[in-house]
Image (spheres, rainbow, N blue to C red):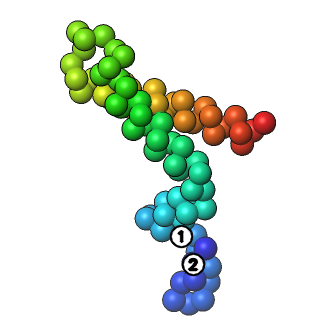
Amino acid sequence: MSTGPTGEERPATGFSTVWGALQAHPWITGIMFVCTVGGAIAGPVLMDADWPLIRQVAAGGFLGAWAGLTMTAIKMIG
């Protein structure tokens, strides 16, 4: 929360909330980043060669992000 010019509290918006979330959860951010980049690198290596390269990278990145989300969500819930 931030304070407005009249002294009332208002919710923070924009970049400050994203940066605050990244600072509050560095391990989750790191895991998501490593999984997404790792998936994007592994995509062209492991996927069908008939697909265009950009599609292989995008699919690998998406699946890597999904794996990172699954790993962190299991730790948060259970």
Question: Residue under circle 2?
Answer: 2
Seen in the image, is 36 located left or right of residue 78? left
At horizontal 71% and vertical 39% (from top left) the residue drawn is: 75
Disc 2 element: strand
At horizontal 34% and vertical 31% (from top left) the residue drawn is: 41
In the image shown, does 5 or 13 lie closer to the viewer? 13
Q: Where is residue 28? Give x, y as percent.
A: 58, 48
Three-letter code for the amino acid on which mark 1 is drawn: Ala
Q: Tell me whether circle 1 and circle 2 mark residues in contact (CB < 8 Å).
A: yes
Q: Where is residue 67? Give x, y as percent.
A: 54, 30
At horizontal 21% and vertical 19% (from top left) the residue drawn is: 52
Image quadrant for the C terminus? top right
Q: Is residue 72 above or below residue 2?
A: above
Question: Residue under circle 1?
Answer: 12
Q: Where is residue 22? Give x, y as percent.
A: 53, 58
Three-letter code for the amino acid on which mark 2 is drawn: Ser
